[in-house]
Amino acid sequence: MSIERENPAHPREIVGTVNPTPPEAVDAAVRNAHRDFHEWSRQPVATRLAVLGRAADALDARKIELAALLARESGKPVSDCRGEIGFAATYLRWVRDHAAEVLHLRGTDDAQGRITPARRAFGVVAAITPWNAPIILSMLKLGPALAGGNSVILKPSPLAPLTVSAAAELLPATTVLHGGADTGRALVTHPLVRKVAFTGGEQAGRAIAAAAGGALTPVLLELGGNDPAIFLDDFALTPNDFERLVLASFATAGQVCMAAKRLYVPETRITEFVESYIAAAQRILIVGEPMDGNTTMGPVVTRTAAERVRGLVTDAETRGARIIPLAAAPPSDGYFLDPVLALGVPDDADLVRLEQFGPAVPILTYRDETEVLTRANDSELGLAASVWSADEEHAFAVAARIEAGFTFINTHNRTGMSLHAPFGGTKNSGFGREYAEEGLLEYVQTTVTHAPAAFRAGGAGLPAGAYPG
Ligand code: NAD
């Protein structure tokens, strides 16, 4: 049975369908991908990188058309979708321009002998991706994996399978398999899959890590976050900064791994903070039709997601929180939610403790830095964080005490990303890194060929005192 993808803004509209690969058909697909690997890995690095560069240009050329499809299947505003696809193309060009240097290892030939290290591909890589930023998250795996000479089987989320399929066609040695957890599991445990790269939620991450562990297959896990944003008592935000902050939480209706999910504000400055925040939200948050270029917040992805987030807000309210709506969702049968702030939420409420992954943000007050760091770090998740202060040195010192893989200063979320900075989680937010040199190195392993001097033609044999044979 095919997978139908509905439009979250208009659930009666089916945007498209894809055919799932049942688990029993995964074997044939992996064997084909293994043949692709042999062919692709034989291409010189320069050839592989040139192909990736051309794929980047082709992706850019189709940005408008693909962004419209992504907006319809995911509910993300079309302007964000264009930004995501453009950024994915930029990332592929970064790989084209930097991979040759990173992948090359210099050998030595001296009195010790001749040592030739090489960075070699694993083989078939299984890339399993979520729905919320499907193009950039797929390209973050495809770019470095293909540069390194691997072939890739990409399994996108059934909640946004269409745009990824179209974009993946632009890349060589890449196969897209559709399906849910069953298909993903068959892929992860296949003996010819030599590396798994996963982005998604903690629960699926645990299942994948366990399955990959059983198969002794290395995994990269980019999981969820519950990012704290800490405002030091000297924070100095302009109205524009407040708008950026609002979007750091509410872009993609809050469904971003590194959204600002818990805001910690000094008790002495809470009133002015909340006033400025609400004013900025009223200017910048336009909730509505994703295909409208002015929209900044669309619906959440499914009915279940909407119900879950409503439940978190109701629970916070029951626990004494004051809920402040920031904008009104349009009347619709789509999965729209009013974006809200929650004030006075207890730290142990689910809205604070869990990744809310929706447009409901708690603002919490604190008295001193030690206290706020303890509370911010009191989480099993450790993806990203931010520190906001007029004093950059002080902000960096506080950042050094935060348990997170990536800490932004005076911004948060997408506006703080850099192609040159490795990104990934600590604690239960995962392991391994994407972006930058580390992101390239995830998809190669170092092998060595060594001719010891003692045994080369004319060598003197094993010297006395050497490691005996
Ligand atoms: P999800 O975990 O439900 O699904 C992600 C992918 O895993 C999908 O393709 C799904 O079909 C597949 N899957 C699920 N169970 C599986 C299993 N047992 N074996 C193999 N495959 C399986 O996540 P989602 O709802 O699509 O995305 C939201 C989550 O992703 C959030 O927690 C978010 O924070 C996280 N995320 C993390 C990052 C990051 O870079 N760290 C980026 C984006 C999203």
Image (tube, rainbow, N blue to C red):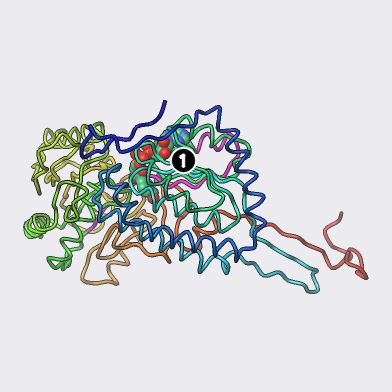
Q: Does residue 114 appear to the left or right of 350 in the view shown?
A: right
Question: In which quadrant of the rendered view does residue 346 lie?
Answer: top left
Q: Does residue 49 appear to the left or right of 321 in the view shown?
A: right
User: What's the residue type where badge 1 is placed?
Assistant: Lys
Q: Between residues 127 and 358, which one lies in front from this camera angle?
A: 127
How many numbered marks appear? 1
Name the residue beneath numbered marker 1. Answer: 155
Classed neighbour count for the residue bearing mark 1: other residues with Cα under 10 Å, few (<14), some (14–19), many (≥20): many
Residue 379 seen by the camera: yes
For label 1, the SS is: strand
Task: State the image coordinates of residue 372 (x, y, percent, origin top left).
Answer: 24, 54
Q: Residue at x 37, y 34 (%)?
A: 17
**Segment tinted magenta in the rendering:** 209-230
Question: In which quadrant of the rendered view does residue 41 lie?
Answer: bottom right
Q: Residue at x 58, y 67 (%)?
A: 100
Task: State the image coordinates of residue 339 (x, y, percent, origin top left).
Answer: 14, 45
Residue 207 seen by the camera: no
Q: Does residue 271 appear to the left or right of 199 in the view shown?
A: left
Task: State the image coordinates of residue 366 (x, y, percent, origin top left).
Answer: 17, 53
Task: State the image coordinates of residue 92 (x, y, percent, origin top left).
Answer: 46, 61
Against 386, is 224 above or below? above
Q: Residue at x 37, y 46 (%)?
A: 163
Q: Between residues 399 and 405, which one lies in front from this camera angle?
A: 405
Task: Give the quarter of the figure containing the N terminus.
Answer: top left
Q: Between residues 399 and 141, which one lies in front from this camera angle?
A: 141
- Is ligand 1 within 8 Å of the beta carbon of the residue shown at mark 1? yes
Q: Does residue 244 appear to the left or right of 59 in the view shown?
A: left
Task: Give the quarter of the figure containing the C terminus.
Answer: bottom right
